[in-house]
Image (cartoon, rainbow, N blue to C red):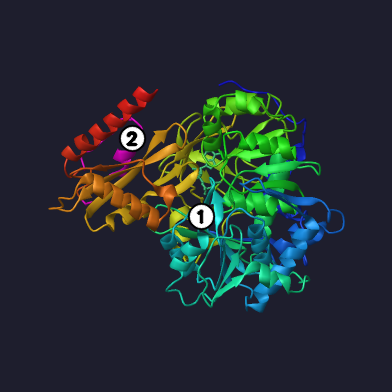
Amino acid sequence: MSEINIGLGNTDTETRRDAESDFVTFWGKQAKNLFWFSTWEKILDWNPPFAKWFVGGTINASYNTLDIHQQDKADKPAILWEGENGESRILTYKEMWIKVQKFTNILKSLGVKKGDRITIYLPMIPELPISMLACARIGAIHTVIFSGFSATSIRDRIDDSKSKIVITADGGYRRGNVIKLKEVIDEAIKDLDFVQNVIVVERAKNKINLSSKDMFWNELMNDVSDTCVAEKLDSSHPLYILYTSGTTGKPKGVLHGTGGYLTHLYSTFKWAFDIRDSDVFFCTADIGWVTGHSYVVYDPLLHGATQVMYEGAPDFPDASRMWEIIQKYHVTIFYTTPTTLRMFMKFGDSLPNSFDLSTLRLLGSVGEPINPEVWKWYFKVIGKEKCPIIDTWWQTETGGMMISALPGLETIPLKPGSGTRPIPGLDVSVVDESGNDVPENTKGFLVIKNPWPGMLLTLWGDDKKYRDVYWSKYKNCYYPGDYALKDADGYFWLLGRADDVLKVSGHRIGTAELESCIVSHSDVAESAVCGVSDEIKGEAIIAFVVLKQNVIKDHIILEKELLIKIRNDIGAIATPKQIYFVTKLPKTRSGKIMRRLLKAMSSNETIGDVSTLEDGTAVSEIQSVFDEIQKSIQKSN
Ligand code: WTA
């Protein structure tokens, strides 16, 4: 494995030493970088698996991202916004502060109180972070939904969170088309009487239907006071719910708190990105996902950084858009996904080479394993062999980065494809099925053995599920559901999901959610979905479907119906690449689908013991499908 020796020259050994000697005191020291209205009495109250960080301390996320910068950074741009259609807007820290206070007053006037939930379904426009920070200012809990989800998915989320206000837009731009967000919301809330109001941002100026619940953002903002004091909230007060796919049917509402979460973010931004006042930060993630929450909204603003926020598709109108933005705004730190990089790599080097990317000094990757050849391309062609690459492993549940090179802290050799080491304060291991540490260079399950400040508080309304999903496989250890190995230098290599969650273009899709959508089609008896490797997306979805007896409908028609159903029930991101109609699925005698088998077959591994199978012939049918897929991959190579 080749190593690359490049860093920013930082050597802070004290931080790691502090963290190793006592991680609790260590995090207490880090929390002092934030503004607290009153300090904590106890750093950590650990009642496994429930952690309360900075007990007794009071804090506010909106205050820490905006008010604290008004002395020395009021006129500094907070957001350099680039619309997909080429429009641009600059919002300074002062402008953000004023808009957030105004919008908070609007929420208050609509009766929103501390602890109320607000659903936000907006495109990547400044009104999205403004809405989130306004909620945070009074302790309302925001729940942002990615603008690609369908009405049914949104309905489930609004219903689960019982949001009383929904914030949306008349439309949003994506690849030159207008996505009619308000229409989707109308459909989603039609039988949800507890939704009192829908606030509509006019972005695309397309025609929408108005009901008595609807109000326009601009009209409300015209006539409201621009001062609103931030509430002093308990450190563990919930900041947001973010729904994410898991191994069970319905998405889980991951609940994050305030003081611990912000401490984790503040520290990781400093260590990983070595953030400086002169930086222009650009994270390409959509705010609808956790990377956008943590590293577009909260973290850059905590640090008073200037960042680029881009509205649309990364390759619109063409594959030079990202490079053009880096050149236009003199971006210094670029943080994106392996899927985006694989897509750009396909277009060759001449496109990025025709732009001035010389302002870049640090590059990041997130969301899925980065293939070493993509890492090297990123390093050479985008970073011109002078920018360290940080490959950051973390999850919606962890709140912030957990394993990453930290050029702001130390200079260590980088290995293409490895996330390197855990952040200070974490005790991470790779274990076998029984929880014993595996030897070096052996694939096993990643576990985290101690609490950390950014960890989720629980799952919204479901403490039991929280315990069962993350803390029951291994005693008092957090189980993220990822395979990993640790090499002889103590570097971690993240090897993909060990459970039934797929990562398609870096988006998390639970197989159970998709299967339950497919089997709700009236002609379907059973279904099993799995991932197959995909050159660009990392993983693509394929679905096996067993039809009910006596269904004689044409498979082409059925496939179309199922694809429409998936788009309507979940969203386009869950669309399978291919649906295969088979006569049976490999099941155990107790009737459970043998997923281990599908996984092994899809990755061309040996299938192991199948003696518990109910009917061995199911294997040969599925195997022949995978053989076909393999053949077509080989052909395209
Ligand atoms: C995967 C995204 C390898 C992993 C921030 C994890 C990664 C899941 C990496 C969480 C990485 C994330 N290398 N795999 N650098 N980063 N993952 O909740 O499987 O959307 O469990 O959070 O993404 O996805 P989520």
Q: Amino acid at mark 1?
A: Ile
The residue labelled by disc 2 is 602
611 sits left or right of 21 in the view: left
Q: Which quarter of the rendered picture does the N terminus lie within?
A: top right
Image: 111 above or below 448: below
Work out which residue is located at the far right of the displayed protein and give it: 71
Q: Is residue 611 magenta?
A: yes
The mark that comes first in sequence, 1 or 2, is: 1
Q: Residues within 10 Å of mark 2 (few under 14, many from 20)?
A: many
Q: Residue at x 59, y 20 (%)?
A: 2
Residue 491 location (% of width, % of height): 58, 32
**Within the image, what quadrant is residue 540 found in?**
top left
Q: Amino acid at mark 2?
A: Ser
Q: Is residue 459 magenta?
A: no
**Within the image, what quadrant is residue 578 found in?**
top left
> In terms of depth relative to the viewer, which is nearer, 349 or 547?
349
> In terms of depth relative to the viewer, which is nearer, 63 or 463?
63
The residue labelled by disc 1 is 179
Residue 177 location (% of width, % of height): 52, 49
Residue 610 location (% of width, % of height): 23, 38
